[in-house]
Image (tube, rainbow, N blue to C red):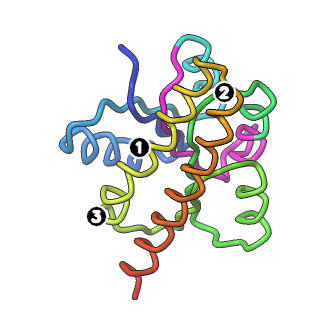
Amino acid sequence: MNDADILVIDDEIELCEIMVLKFTRQGYKVKACHSAQEAEEYLSQHIPPLILCDINMPKKSGLEFVNDLREKRMPCAVVMVTAYADKEKMLEAMRLGCVDFITKPFKFGHMVDCLPLWLEIGNTLQRLTKEKDLSEIEQGLEVIDTIRVKANLMARRRSA
């Protein structure tokens, strides 16, 4: 498969298939992996700007996976997806640099609305990493913080 815009990682095969179908219909290129190990293999050749990752998976959790991504300094935005709204896990995900935290069951309309913001964060990280300009990276991080605030405001408005 060619480079995807979005990598979905979830051991629930049916959910992956639905996400691929819905996001593809929106014009995105989507790749699904059903384990952290499968995702790592894909990421050895392709780095998408956005990863949607389940937290609770066999063998390696989503948080362990994201920690490994950060250690490798992979330039991508990560959104954690979980059926268990655990405040500690949410805080850990944010500490690891995740741009958002979505609980299942979620509304696909909300995710589709947030995809452009999440992708903008990931694309900005990739562009800045390629340029390796520290002053631009600092400015980019400020832009990313602004985008994250906008995404959180959108999420709050949708849930209100």
Q: Is residue 119 left or right of residue 126?
A: left
Q: Is residue 86 left or right of residue 11?
A: right
Q: Which residue is mark 3?
A: 109
Which of the two residues, 17 or 51, is positioned nearer the viewer here? 51
Quarter-wise, where is residue 24 in the image? Answer: top left
Element class at badge 1? helix
Q: Which residue is mark 1?
A: 16
- Amino acid type at circle 2 is Met
How many residues crowd around disc 1 within 10 Å: few (fewer than 14), some, or many (20 or more)?
many
The CA span between labels 1 and 3 is 16 Å
- Amino acid type at circle 1 is Cys
Q: Residue at x 55, y 56 (%)?
A: 81
Check the image and report above or below for 136 versus 112: above
Check the image and report above or below for 118 versus 102: above
Of marks 2 and 1, the one in the foreground: 2
Q: Is residue 77 left or right of residue 27?
A: right
Q: Which residue is mark 2?
A: 74
The CA span between labels 3 and 2 is 28 Å
Can you give x and y, in whole percent of width and height, for residue 58 in the image? 70, 42
Element class at badge 3? helix
Element class at badge 2? loop
Check the image and report above or below for 44 versus 87: above
Q: Residue at x 61, y 42 (%)?
A: 139
- Amino acid type at circle 3 is Gly
Marks 3 and 2 in Cβ contact (< 8 Å): no
Which label number is shown at residue 24? Answer: none
Can you give x and y, in whole percent of width and height, for residue 16 in the image? 41, 43
Q: Residue furthest bottom?
A: 160
The magenta stretch is: 46-66
Earlier residue among tags 2 and 1: 1
Which of the two residues, 62 or 142, is positioned nearer the viewer here? 142
Q: Is residue 80 magenta?
A: no
